[in-house]
Amino acid sequence: MVEILCPHCEGEIELDDDASGTYICPHCDSEFEWGFDDFHIPKSKSEKPWFIIAGILRIFYKIQGLMFWIAAIPVILFLVVIVFVCIFSD
Ligand SMILES: [Zn+2]
């Protein structure tokens, strides 16, 4: 037997070790799937560091992109002002 927690009410449910399929929680009468997740648990655990690294990289690139625009906007405005001054200075 294996003890699991209901995904709906977190009540303890006992299932067979090789149980898989759709079950009804005896605590809250909600349906949940069990067994298919067995294949995903080790995979998601091994993938977790990559998700963290990917998340950090994504934040890093977002900050980098933001920093680029923070630096670029005054330069662009400055160039636009210079162009306008040159055109209308006569
Ligand atoms: Zn439940």
Image (tube, helix red, strand yellow):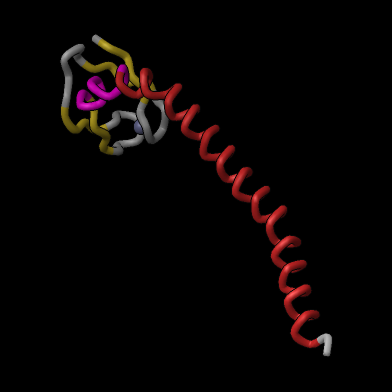
Q: Answer whether residue 40 is magenta in the image.
A: yes
Residue 4, percent from left and from top: 33, 19
Name the quadrant of the C terminus.
Answer: bottom right
Q: Is residue 26 above or below residue 62?
A: above
Residue in the foreground of this view, choosing between 82 and 67: 82
Image mark count: 0
Which residues, given as a range, are shown in magenta?
Answer: 35-42
Name the residue located 38 percent from the left edge and 35 percent from the top edge: 8
Q: Is residue 77 above or below residue 88?
A: above
Name the residue located 49 percent from the left edge and 27 percent from the top edge: 53
Q: Image quadrant of ligand 1? A: top left
Find the residue positioned furthest to the front: 90
Find the residue positioned furthest to the right: 89
- In the visual, does 54 lie left or right of 75? left
- In the visual, does 71 lie left or right of 8? right
Find the residue positioned furthest to the bottom: 90
Residue 5, percent from left and from top: 37, 23
- In the visual, does 50 lie left or right of 1? right
Residue 77, percent from left and from top: 74, 68
Name the residue located 27 percent from the left edge and 12 percent from the top edge: 2
Name the quadrant of the N terminus.
Answer: top left
Q: Is residue 36 above or below residue 2?
A: below
Name the residue located 16 percent from the left edge and 29 percent from the top edge: 21
- State whether the magenta stretch is mostly helix, strand or loop: helix
The image quadrant that residue 38 belongs to is top left
The image quadrant that residue 29 belongs to is top left
Q: Answer whether residue 28 is magenta in the image.
A: no
- In the visual, does 72 lie left or right of 8? right
Residue in the foreground of this view, choosing between 28 and 87: 87
Residue 44, percent from left and from top: 35, 24
Q: Is residue 2 above or below residue 37?
A: above
